[in-house]
Image (cartoon, helix red, strand yellow):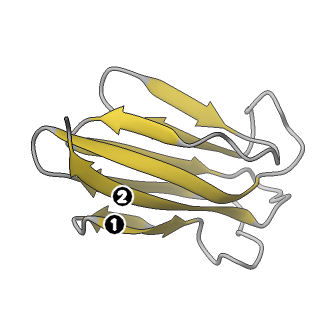
Amino acid sequence: CKGIFIQSEGMVTSPGYPNKYTADNYCKQIIHAPPNSVIAIHFTKLDLGRDNMCNSDYLQINNGDKTAKYCGSGLPEDIFISTERLEILFVSSSIPLGTGFAFWYETSAEN
């Protein structure tokens, strides 16, 4: 799966959400924002199996300088990132174990 989000807000989900995701995913999605923006992310679901070491199924968020990796089933706190490009990578193993992820994003001008 591929996707480019250019709207000022929207929802990003794992493939097949809210049903279980399939095996062997490598999904890259990009959120684009205007220059001097903040992208806010609010998770509504995170169920990527029981691997809390993020070795098999995980969600990775890259903004060029920093990378955050999420796995397991605990909801992360809201994220606020000053950037105009955010890369979302979802990887699943040959044995999918969860229902996936969903988050809302919103872009706004940096103060």
> Where 29 falls versus 87 (above or below)?
below
> Where 81 falls versus 96 (above or below)?
above
- Residue 9 in the image, given as x and y percentages of width and height: 34, 66
Q: Residue at x 40, y 22 (%)?
A: 66
In the rendered image, the quadrant that contains the N terminus is bottom left
> Where 108 falls versus 103 (above or below)?
above
Compared across the picture, whether 1 is left or right of 73 comes to left
**Amino acid type, mark 1:** Glu
In the rendered image, the quadrant that contains the C terminus is top left
**Amino acid type, mark 2:** Glu
- Residue 104 in the image, given as x and y percentages of width and height: 49, 62
Q: Residue at x 41, y 48 (%)?
A: 40
Compared across the picture, whether 3 is left or right of 60 comes to left
Q: Nearer the viewer, residue 26 or 72?
A: 72
Residue placed under numbered mark 2 in the picture: 106
Q: Secondary structure under badge 2? A: strand
Q: Residue at x 71, y 62 (%)?
A: 100
Residue placed under numbered mark 1 in the picture: 9
Whether residues under marks 2 and 1 lie with C-beta atoms below 8 angstroms apart, the answer is yes
Q: Nearer the viewer, residue 56 or 99?
A: 99
Q: Nearer the viewer, residue 8 or 25?
A: 8
Q: Secondary structure under badge 1? A: strand
